[in-house]
Amino acid sequence: MRLGERKVTIKELVQTAHGDSVYAGWHDAPREKGTLLMLMVSEIAEAMEGERKNLMDDKLPNRLMAEVELADAVIRIADYCGLHDYDLQGAILEKLEYNRTREDHKREVRMMPGGKAF
């Protein structure tokens, strides 16, 4: 499937990312969850470096490094969810809905002294 030709659901992204990883042999030998989670973190760290230095990506030179590294993080997350049969799409939608009801996510509460800044 050529993903750029149409909009895809998160579920389809998970299936594609995981399928590509399996096909490439990334799951031939079992890897522990902690290792896979830290690989996600490393992509975020690389995005930070791209932002800090305002770099263009070395593999996709028409794109910002931060943008590509965040894409790598999403791909790793999608692969992990496919490997463990997690419903990422459902969880995202439920979490977005839940966050709309949180006191500490309301603008007026965040602006109060001691409010959530990050």
Image (spheres, rainbow, N blue to C red):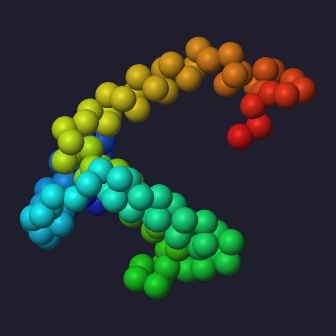
Among the 4 quarters of the image, the one containing residue 75: bottom left
Q: Residue at x 79, y 20 (%)?
A: 109
Please tell me whether residue 1 is drawn above or below residue 91 in the rendered image.
Answer: below
Residue 91 percent location from the top left of the image:
36, 29
Q: Is residue 73 visible?
A: no
Residue 84 percent location from the top left of the image:
21, 42
Q: Quadrant of the C terminus?
A: top right
Comparing 43 with 19, the one in front is: 43
Comparing 41 with 100, the one in front is: 41
Q: Quadrant of the N terminus?
A: bottom left
Residue 76 percent location from the top left of the image:
33, 57
Among the 4 quarters of the image, the one containing residue 104: top right
Count of picture labels: 0
Q: Residue at x 55, y 80 (%)?
A: 56
Comparing 69 with 4, the one in front is: 69
From the viewer's perspective, is 106 left or right of 69? right
Q: Residue at x 32, y 57 (%)?
A: 36
Q: Is residue 78 visible?
A: yes
Residue 92 percent location from the top left of the image:
40, 32
Q: Residue at x 25, y 36 (%)?
A: 86
Residue sticking out furthest to the right:
113
Comparing 92 with 39, the one in front is: 39
